[in-house]
Image (cartoon, rainbow, N blue to C red):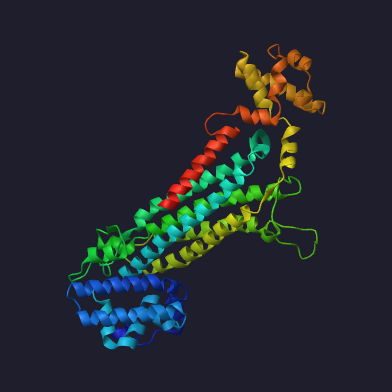
Amino acid sequence: MKLWGGRFAKETDALVEEFNASIPFDKRLYEEDIRGSMAHCRMLANQGIICGDEAEQILAGLAVIKEEMDRGEVEFSLALEDIHMHVEKRLTEKIGPVGGKLHTGRSRNDQVALDMHMYVKKEILETVALIGNLQEALVNLAEDNLDAVMPGYTHLQRAQPVLFAHHLLAYFWMLQRDRERFLDSFGRADWMPLGAGALAGTTFPVDREMVASELGFAKLYENSMDAVSDRDFVLEFLSNSAIMMTHLSRLSEDIIIWNSQEFGFITLDDAFTTGSSIMPQKKNPDVAELVRGKTGRVYGHLMGLLTVLKGLPLAYNKDMQEDKEGLFDTVDTIKICLRLYAAMLRTVEPNKERMYAAVARDFASATDLADYLVRKGLPFREAHAVVGQLVGKCVAENRQLVDLTTEELTEACSHFEDDAKEMLPPEACVEARQSRGGTARSEVEVQIRHAKSLLINDQEK
């Protein structure tokens, strides 16, 4: 008989049993479920709801079940529906009817909410650590290549010269915001729902504060209906993950482009690429492509749960069982993406000569030439027009700005002087941008020091 089957005259239809069960996926919550049950048991004993001997039997039984599940020795059954029923059933098998006292003063509604809060808290911290590992890889790659100059792009058109390190560090700061978002959301996952019962609280004199303290929760839900129906903390985890995957997807696009033969700015290690079944010469950036593709998968889980929750009346509804598979898949997806990216970036080999060649014979210094005229007293809009005409002349004559003589420059505008051509080398353009956050080497070194200090402080915390 099912643990809830007292009022039922018929057995559950086999197809309903399969459809209803969550054990195929929520079995991964067994650690949280057992830990939460132990805290609940100690509280029941402390409050005199069960006696001390009963609590000792229950705690000993739960410890053994935890060890069995750690070793993968427990067979899971669809008939027992979920991880909560499996733990309780195994407990009664081990210690007899006293095991049935564990569920006193709680419902599966507040029990599963507790498990999910504990799980999300754990995964937030693990995710933050993995993001930090990836950030460290980015900083190291940037610091090792401070002399590499490459084209910076807008609209995927060459725009202005930048340091390769500067481009990489843009992703460091994106990931820093991701870390901060996850850590901020930790505070809202850190609310303890147990004691809410099915929806209205419990008639037993439970001590919710004791359970919260033992499980390391900072706050209690103030409303029992909110406690069992809230999945905001799951939505936040999914949302934070979706934003982070956006950043990894953009990085993937850059990696894929830079690794192409047309660009040739970097070489990816063989260990992080794959080949073609038909074309022997191929070396494909499959890791980056898969990360880019899996971004849509994470987006889908966020939209899926938002859609599930949007029309639910209070309090708990079975629809909310759909919060788990998307969350679990998101956790697995983002963690492997973060691990792979950190490992892959540590093996990237920049082709500095190819980067420099791409920007040396180009019009990327046009803005600097216009800025030169502004410093000589010409309004920027007029300077913009003058340099634009010079670019047009070069395009028509298949030349570059560096090919123009001083005479040709002064013919275009009398504000040009002999030092004008000093503005044109890519490295000069880079070094000229010493505004805070700019691409000049001195400013990039400031970024690196700042980035390292953030990583050290976060590790110490």
Q: Quadrant of residue 310?
A: bottom left
Q: Nearer the viewer, residue 441 or 41?
A: 441
Please state the horizontal and vertical placement of residue 202, each as a whole percent of the image: 21, 70
**Whether residue 240 is situated above or below residue 64 in the rendered picture:** above
Q: Quadrant of the N terminus?
A: bottom left
Asked whether the viewer can see residue 416, the reply is yes
User: Residue at left 70%, top 22%?
Assistant: 422
Q: Quadrant of residue 100?
A: bottom left
Q: Does residue 327 appear left or right of residue 1 in this picture?
A: right
Q: Does residue 314 appear left or right of residue 17 in this picture?
A: left
User: Residue at left 67%, top 20%?
Assistant: 385
- Farthest right residue in view: 397
- Farthest top residue in view: 414
Q: Nearer the viewer, residue 17 or 95?
A: 95
User: Residue at left 42%, top 76%?
Assistant: 20
Asked whether the viewer can see residue 154, the reply is no
Please state the horizontal and vertical placement of residue 188, each as a whole percent of the image: 35, 55
Q: Nearer the viewer, residue 397 or 71?
A: 71
Please state the horizontal and vertical placement of residue 440, each as a whole percent of the image: 60, 32
User: Residue at left 46%, top 63%?
Assistant: 327
**Whether residue 110 is situated above or below residue 405 in the rendered picture:** below
How many circles with numbers are drawn on the protein? 0
Please state the horizontal and vertical placement of residue 215, each as a whole percent of the image: 31, 65
Q: Does residue 29 appear left or right of residue 172 in this picture?
A: left
Q: Nearer the viewer, residue 141 or 370?
A: 141
